[in-house]
Image (cartoon, rainbow, N blue to C red):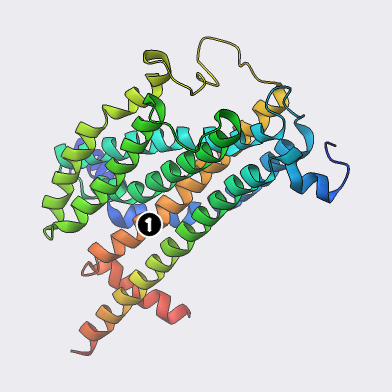
Amino acid sequence: MTNMNGQRLRLFTFAAPSRFYSLSGSLLPWLWAAAALLAATGLYIGFFVAPTDAQQGESYRIIFIHVPAAWMSMVVYLAMAGWAAIGWIFNARMASMLARALAPSGMVFTLIALATGSFWGKPAWGTWWVWDARLTSELILLFLYVGYIALVEAIDDVRRADHAGALLAIVGAINVPVIYFSVRWWNTLHQGATITMNAAPKMQSTMLTAMLLLTFAFWAYAFAVVFVRARAIVLEREHDAEWVRGLAFATRNSA
Amino acid sequence: MNWGGASEFFSMGGYGVYVWGSYGITAALIGFESWLTLRRRQRALRDALQAASAEAQR
């Protein structure tokens, strides 16, 4: 075998479900630990170091989970659409499995963003819900996640389901910039971006630290739970493969 | 330190319902998702083992 072929082989070996399974398995304890540690530190700073807000009193402390969850709901969607597209274009099984593994976590982050937003809207605006651009587009994101999950679960042929899901995910991705820029494009009750690329943050530094620590905690959690779900999907789909049988016997013998 | 005592901490300056409601629902959703996902992987591994054993006995 030539050197070039050897390299190509190695590239595809990393994308193989068996390789993903063992690699993610060794990362998982660190990801769970990082999520717990970052969340504990962020919550401590958020509740015991960050001062009371001059305008909103203590109700502003919802921001420490609301903004990170809203960010994650969009980032996870883009990751899901990206992996779904790669899985479709290159006929890569593992990419399609990752797309499916991301969807429920994105849905959970969207639910958290909507629920905490509602709990914040009541004291800040006097209403649990308002049909403005930011809230409505985030609700559409929830429906996109639900629609994607329902669609891929409804089609029995696994690869056809992956392709149909990819189409929905890619078309729906247009909603993500709409959510992000909605506060600029339309008049809205919702406040503007908390952090932008080209301006200094308008928050006090301890508040910002707490929010960023919880953002990293959510990232670590997202990786952990998506990896676990992807490993489950790999086992469900590849249960006939030689390596899964070997793994099953190895687990039994070690138990 | 922001709080004079536990009751002051839990009342959150009168916003306790909203703040703890937010954190409570977040904890519940994350806990529930983790539990469901870890259970799904355990079941998938158990099913793979059963399939492999059944195959080996034939």
Q: In which quarter of the image is the N terminus of chain A?
A: top left
Q: Which residue is drawn at 51% across and 48% down?
A: A221
- The residue at the far front in this view is A126
- The residue at the far bottom in this view is B57
Q: How many marks?
A: 1
Chain of the residue under the numbered disc 1 shown in the image: A
Residue under numbered circle 1: A229
Q: Residue at x 30, y 44 (%)?
A: A145
Q: Give the quadrant of residue B39.
A: bottom left
- Estimate the x, y position of residue A154 in percent, counting from the top left: 17, 57
- Give above or below for A115 relative to A26: above
- Estimate the x, y position of residue A205 in percent, counting from the top left: 70, 22
Q: Residue at x 78, y 34 (%)?
A: A49
Would residue A2 be seen by someone viewing this image from the given angle? no
Of the residues shown, which amino acid type is indicated by label 1?
Arg
- Estimate the x, y position of residue A97 in percent, counting from the top left: 27, 51
Q: Residues within 10 Å of mark 1 (few under 14, many from 20)?
A: many
Element type where label 1 sits in the image: helix
Q: Which of B1 and A234 is in front in this view?
A: B1
Would residue A81 be seen by someone viewing this image from the given angle? yes
Q: In this view, does A242 lie to the left or right of B40?
A: left
Q: Give the quadrant of residue A140.
A: top left
- Give above or below for A242 relative to B28: below
- The residue at the far right in this view is B4
Q: Which of B54 and A121 is in front in this view?
A: A121
